[in-house]
Amino acid sequence: MKEILKHILLALAILNIPTFGLVTFNPAIGAAASALSLVALTLYYFFVKKSKPILPLLILGILYYSIGGLNFTGESSEFIKNIFRYFLFIISITEVAKNTTNKEAIFYLLVGAMSIVINALVFSDSYGRYAGFYINPNKAGLICILGFAFTYTLINKSHKLIAQFLFTIAGLATLSRYFFLMLVIINITSIFANRKNAIGLIAGAIGFIVIINTPAFELNTGRFEALRSIFSSGEIKTKTITTEPRNETWALYTDIILDKLFFGNGYGALQGRGAGAMDIKVGVHNTYLMVLGESGIIPFLIIVILYLSLLFKSAKLFTTNPEYLYISIVLATALLVAHKYFYNYVVLFFTIWLYSKLHMGKNRLENE
């Protein structure tokens, strides 16, 4: 029973099944998957050994929703529903995350990555950026780079290279600039851990060659040509690469954030739902700024300290568990380009996973 519930929750959380069912099929399927998630979380919490929730996430949630709720003027039912989902998830999923092995994490991340490849090969479209189960190509890129980071826990060299190749192919199909940047950073960082990890660059190179020479991959022309220009002898198409940079989006909210720095503008104000007199329709695409702008300086400091502590603690274990540093870099930087943190269950799950490994004494040898 415990293992069945565990794998149901892993599939629902990592594979984004509720949202995929809602958007791709119909609301009934999405609602059914969401209901299954709630039931599985509740059953796991009450019938399986309980772990204490991650204290920083608990405090962050309490302060963010309580302070942000003071100036909230939207639908109270939706607000309460989001509070309930957040706390149920972080409280109930802790034991699941603690008991998730590296191989299990890689398996579900690889299934998610393969959904992106299938999307690109079988269900291609004119948009030319693919996401599989994740709907949003940027979120799909996060899945691929998390999976790539986990491949460094694989002992078998051929398994590692194959997994890195598959995650690279899937990541390239998203055409996510974040994925490209993190792929370079993780590959370079991994060489400091072990020079033999340079083989990861080979996986990336092969993946790029496959993408270029496979007509079935109908990728977004502008982004794809810009990416290819980096590796060609011609002019690099920097204009396409830098189109709609995140810092321009962040700048839209500067005055709103500074105007109410201590207690924020209220829940939802920086999520594209209309913020002050400016009535901005695009979200801030930065979790740190969202927390600061909606609930003020105290929750902001908590989330910053949380992810900085994960980075520093991971760095201390770099010689024995280098994958911790790769994953902490991915999690901390992912928050710089997305604002749906409190219902981004992939980021929350792996934050809990990493926190548990760093603070509860489990190491990689126990996890393989």
Image: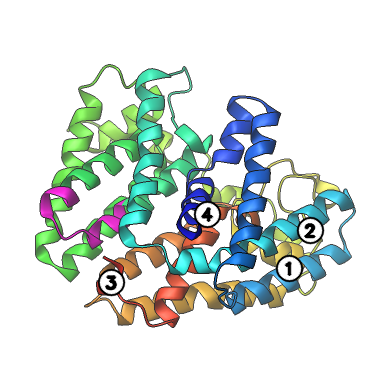
In the image, what residue type sits under mark 4? Leu
- Nearest to N terminus: mark 1 or mark 4: 4
Is residue 252 rendered to the left or right of residue 124?
right
What range of the chain is rendered magenta?
148-160
User: Pointers 3 and 2 in contact (CB under 8 A)?
Assistant: no
The kind of secondary structure element at disc 4 is: helix
- Nearest to N terminus: mark 4 or mark 3: 4
What residue would you read off at disc 2? 267
**Spatial separation of the CA atoms under disc 4 and disc 2:** 33 Å
**Spatial separation of the CA atoms under disc 2 and disc 1:** 8 Å
In the image, what residue type sits under mark 1? Tyr
The mark found on residue 364 in the picture is 3
In the image, what residue type sits under mark 3? Arg
Mark 1 or 4: the one toward you: 4
- Nearest to N terminus: mark 3 or mark 2: 2
What residue would you read off at disc 4? 5
Question: Alpha-carbon neighbours of circle 3 within 10 Å: few (<14), some, or many (≥20)?
Answer: some
**Spatial separation of the CA atoms under disc 1 and disc 4:** 30 Å
The kind of secondary structure element at disc 2 is: loop
Mark 3 or 1: the one toward you: 3
Residue at image coords 48%, 76%: 308
Dominant SS of magenta comes to: helix
User: Pointers 4 and 2 in contact (CB under 8 A)?
Assistant: no
Depicted 361 relative to depicted 130: above or below: below
Q: Is residue 339 visible?
A: no
**Spatial separation of the CA atoms under disc 3 and disc 1:** 33 Å
In the image, what residue type sits under mark 2? Tyr
User: Pointers 2 and 1 in contact (CB under 8 A)?
Assistant: yes
Q: Percent position (x, y) of residue 302?
A: 62, 77
- Nearest to N terminus: mark 2 or mark 1: 1
Is residue 195 rendered to the left or right of residue 273?
left
